Amino acid sequence: MGWLLGLLERVRLFEPEGSRQDAMPEIAPLGDERVDLGRCDVHELLLVIEDVFPQDAVLRLAAPSGEMREFLETHALAANRSLYDLPLDNGSFREFQALAATSADPEIGDHVFVHMGGRMLLEAYDCGLDTFIASDLPPEAIVRLRQTIRR
């Protein structure tokens, strides 16, 4: 029986809980060229992400828990250890937003990122205690983020 489970795991028809290991691009963190937004409300951040960032950007969440993790296990584009990538341009992101609206900050994830094309666009650490965005985003995007996500 063990050989059968091993075979099924290799062809990815069966995955034991918590074992998902998809190929995820490594994205370098924002460097010194970033804008510090300070503290933000993660729920507000999730509501504005779709309006501020390009539709081909990807939401990356670190260490979600509970219902959020269960949702991401089945809807994420890629998952590796406790990181999950969810594209903004499909219906799953909107489902995620709705689920997040009724979840506590820590369940959403320890850290929230947005990346696109191998480049980090947003970093929100510790449920939004420290939030940074790429300094070369359009000025109106930076203003919109500042106005919307401030705690």
Image (spheres, rainbow, N blue to C red):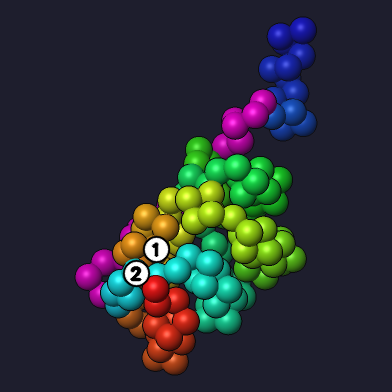
| Up-down relation of residue 144 to residue 90 (above or below) | below
**Which amino acid type corresponds to the residue marked 2 in the rendered image?**
Arg
Quarter of the picture containing the N terminus is top right
Q: To which quarter of the image does residue 118 belong?
A: bottom left
| Image coordinates for residue 46, horizontal then vertical, percent | 55, 69
**Which amino acid type corresponds to the residue marked 1 in the rendered image?**
Gly
Q: CB of mark 1 within 8 Å of CB of mark 2?
A: yes
| Up-down relation of residue 93 to residue 64 (above or below) | below
Q: Pointer 2: residues within 10 angstroms few (<14), some, or many (20+)?
A: some
**Cα gap from disc 1 to disc 2, whole angstroms:** 6 Å
Circle count: 2
Query: Can I make out residue 129 in this image?
Result: yes
- Residue placed at 77% from the left, 31% from the top? 13
Q: Is residue 21 magenta?
A: yes
Q: Is residue 129 or residue 102 the one in the foreground?
A: 102
66 horizontally vs 2: left or right = left
Q: Is residue 74 or residue 11 the one in the foreground?
A: 74
Please report the bounds of the magenta region as a residue range: 16-34
Quarter of the picture containing the C terminus is bottom left
| Image coordinates for residue 75, horizontal then vertical, percent | 70, 51
Instruction: Name the residue carrying label 1.
Output: 128
Q: Is residue 62 magenta?
A: no
| Up-down relation of residue 56 to residue 87 (above or below) | below
Instruction: Name the residue carrying label 2.
Output: 39
Q: Is residue 144 or residue 33 the one in the foreground?
A: 144
- Residue placed at 34% from the left, 62% from the top? 129
